[in-house]
Amino acid sequence: MMLRSKRAHRPRVLMLIENVPLARDHRLRKQAAALLASQFEVTVICQRDPRNKSCVPGVRVLEYPAPPEGAGLLAFAGEYGYSVVMAGLLTVWAFFRHGFDILQVASTPDIYFLIAAPCRWLGRPVVFDFRDPSPETYQARYGRSDGAMYRALLLLERWSLRAADCVLVVNESLRQMARQRGGVDDARIVLVGNGPAASRVARLPARPELRQGRPRLCCWVGLIGPQDRVDLALEAVDHLVHVRKRTDCTFVFVGAGEALPAARQQAADLDLGDWVSFPGWAQEELVFDYLSTADVGLEPNTEDYVSPVKVMEYLAAGLPVVAFSAEENIRLAGEAAWYAPKGNITVMARLIDELLDDEVSRGQMGRIGQNRVKEFIAWDHQAGPYVLALAELLGQPPRIAPGPAGGSTRKKQDREVISVTRTGLVDTDEAIA
């Protein structure tokens, strides 16, 4: 159902996000800024955070207190039920107080179809920002792809996809999922990547003290959840330090999350305390300093459907990458990374070891990565298709802010993705070096 608006006012977008506040959601902030630059009015409903109302100037923020933290099925059900009620009440308030022409909801979790469906009945088009598949996230966390919970997540995902007039996907793997599991036709799917702004393509002066007294530094950044497989990265570090005897490198895992305590305990159990550190959540400036000082970026994710934001940040900072050969890792990094077979920590350790000793390759890979970001990964190339998709839902000519984004960028990206070389990919049965 589409609304062919004839109103004179600026088009108004209401955005709902459940699991993090606006201040902690990089993608939502970039989307809101792109809409504001294109003369949209933007309202965001999210969890309360003191930085929400200043992180994107011009956005109206309607916030509610975060639900109590907990673990287990009942805790998650309580959290999601509370969030739906609070977001629903604020949506009604926004409808009558400010009005909106488009509703955008984001996964995960896939619960806001309960709000999206009534909005469609009222003539407001719905955009579903399909970022991560809940069933696969559940499988990665709990090792199960069966049972009532897994089937329920598939059903919620399907309802969310079908409640939308337009589905945004961050990569080709999620496009296929939207087609196959949601029955969404290609005309309703728009690929909008999640790259950093082109202005962030830079390598800052190194801060040698971050290496903690050693000549080399390897870095991992992000939210530390069970599905992020920091455990595999730590196993690779253990092999590198205790088997290959590489002791001149510090390994820093920057970030916070529910799996951080387990990661710290694993590092202690592996006797890695002298080489591994966990500084916790860091402000962007410090993250940039770590990336600009590091010699190698690590990506231990093994899931093919994940577009790792950390890899995009590594590339923007000119940091070569060692990763597992997951499909979206290869699609993103291309020749800016060396790849170990998925889950093979001994090969990952060997590739880290060799890359740390190969300054020429590190320099070449860093330049390739930065060029990939500049040419098609950067958000500057994604903002145009995103704004255009929302303008088309309203039947209005888009008022896209000037910039490098545009339709030709997507064609260029498709060509480059097809030509990716799997640098460093080796057989899974390779013997330990």
Image (cartoon, rainbow, N blue to C red):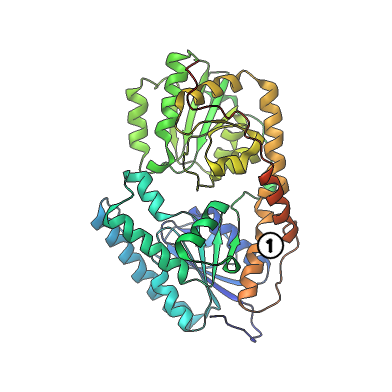
Q: For the residue carrying disc 1, how many other residues have a C-alpha within 10 Å: few (<14), some (14-19), or many (20+)?
A: many
The residue lying toward the viewer, choosing from 199 and 358, is 358
The spot of residue 100 in percent (x, y) is 53, 78
The spot of residue 421 in percent (x, y) is 66, 36
Q: Residue 383 vs residue 408: left or right?
A: left
Whether residue 216 is visible here, answered yes or no, is yes
The spot of residue 33 in percent (x, y) is 62, 62
The spot of residue 285 in percent (x, y) is 58, 41
The residue depicted at 62 percent of the width and 34 percent of the height is 422
Q: Residue 40 vs residue 92: left or right?
A: right
Q: Residue 117 vs residue 79: left or right?
A: right
- Most extreme residue toward the bottom is 6
Whether residue 225 is visible here, answered yes or no, is no
The residue lying toward the viewer, choosing from 280 and 160, is 160
SS of the residue under disc 1: helix
Q: Amino acid at mark 1?
A: Gly
Q: Please count the marks in the image.
A: 1
Quadrant assignment, res 355: top right
Quadrant assignment, res 330: top right
Q: Which residue is mark 1?
A: 384
The residue depicted at 70 percent of the width and 27 percent of the height is 363
The residue depicted at 55 percent of the width and 19 percent of the height is 353
Does residue 335 sit above or below 201 in this rendering?
A: above
The residue depicted at 41 percent of the width and 26 percent of the height is 235
The residue lying toward the viewer, choosing from 196 and 235, is 235
The residue lying toward the viewer, choosing from 29 and 432, is 432
- Most extreme residue toward the top is 245
Does residue 355 sit above or below 109 in this rendering?
A: above
